[in-house]
Amino acid sequence: MNDWLWMSAGELGRAIGRGEVDPVALTRAYLEAEQAHPLSHRIYARLTPERAEAEAEAAAQRAREGRRLSPLDGVPVSWKDLFDTAGTGTEAGSALLKGRVPERDARVLKNATAAGLVCLGKTHMSELAFSGLGLNSKTETAPCVHDPARVAGGSSSGAAASIAHGLAPVAVGSDTGGSVRIPSAWNDLVGLKTVHGRLSLEGVVPLCETFDTVGPLARNVEDAALMLAALEGGKAPDLRGASLKGRRFAVLQTAVLDDLDDGPNRAFASSINRLKDAGAIVEPIDAPEVADAMGLSGVLFTVDAYGYWRDVIEANPEAMDHRIRDRFRSGGRHTGPEYVEGWIALRKYRAQWAARVAGYDGVLLPTCPSVPPEIDRLQSDTDYYVTENLRVLRNTRVVNLMGGCAVTLPTGVPSCGIMICGTGSEERLLRLASAAEQALMSGA
């Protein structure tokens, strides 16, 4: 059964369908692994064992009767602690929401349950999802798979750690500026950032409602595709026969290649070569609208976030880490006209970007310019925390600002991912990512 803990969600689903894996035994194996893992308290905020066992028993019955609900029927999944879970605390990593217990499941959780997935529990995260590092001084800081003394990335930190440490086969997170892709990259996983509005935000504790998105973290592209279907109640794209031959990629030069750590720099260059060897056509592009849009982040993200959370924060400001609180409060320094002007400008930049990349199948860039920093230094050095948080969000935020979808893939270099920004639908991107995944794995 220990082997089950390291199988992909797709593999587990097929094994359940063949009668080789019992969903109840599988769920219990994960719950027991969580209980035995020395770092589990830093990964899961709370488990849902009664719900998990009941859902697994129902899945086992369906499997025996040949009426499975989806390819992932009976497969366990972890949920970031901002997805409402009926009768279970959902606190979004914040002492401000301590004791918050919703009455209903989030829409995406309802959809996943209807597809037969088994809810294992809720994973730790950055406070109110407002950090790309994953540090949380108020609850727990999830460990990077390569070094527990380093952060896992945020804000879906525990989501990534649950997979990387063998405590879930797949996880669900949210991405406002990189919160699915950063922890995926730092823990050598696949992370899918969906287009805003593709997946329901009903019952999801918000950060910036105009940028928030839901997305899966997974061991491979197939699992990400299967989870996308489960989260919206649809059908997964067919990834068979995906190829890079003749596919055109742009390599973004503007801003995202500056100040790269050695690991991400080497990993990106090596990955580009492997994609070329697989038949891809790769060309550099400059996009000044990206730099212009980045300059709007301080207005658009913070005003949105503080506008929603101001009254809650100011009613109990000492309940927050001062660094997160200060970042929220920075939204109060901007005026209404500045916010409106920012959105007018961003819509113009999005149109320019769409026209620039329309002739490409995807745009390539390093997922993160840096590798996971040490927890102790982030805790003790506020200036370093602020600098590293902004730095790690730089590349991923491009896609949120431009309004598209993206996927990060492991490169074979620990904690270094390569990101493909889509120029069309998630289905098209996932086929492209599947072909890229094969090229990167064959050359690793």
Image (cartoon, helix red, strand yellow):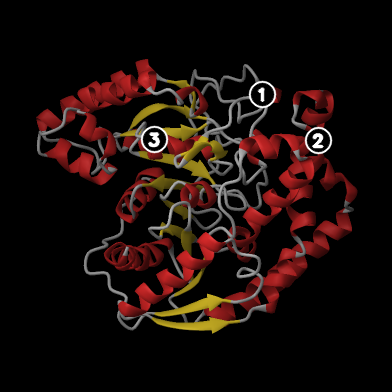
Q: For mark 3, does the 10 Å Cα neighbourhood hold few (<14), some (14 to 19), or many (20 or more) residues?
A: many
Residue at left offset 48%, top offset 29%: 43
Toward the viewer: 198 or 290?
Answer: 290
Please report the residue visible at 79 percent of the width from the left and 48 percent of the height from the top.
Answer: 303
Residue corresponding to mark 3:
165
Q: Which mark is residue 147?
A: none
Q: Which numbered disc covers residue 310? A: 2
In the picture provided, is 70 more to the left or to the right than 367? left
Residue found at x 25% / y 36%: 73
Residue 382 x/y as whole percent = 78, 41
**Distance of label 3 from label 1 (alpha carbons):** 27 Å
Nearest the viewer among 27 and 29 is: 29
**In this picture, residue 379 sits left or right of residue 67:** right
On the image, the x and y values in percent for residue 70 come to 25, 42
Q: Residues within 10 Å of mark 1 (few under 14, many from 20)?
A: some
Seen at 67% across and 25% down, the residue is: 138
Q: Amino acid at mark 1?
A: Leu
Q: Is residue 310 left or right of residue 165?
A: right
From the image, tell me which residue sits under label 1. 97
Of residues 407 and 215, the one nearer the viewer is 407
Asked if residue 421 can be seen in this view, the reply is no
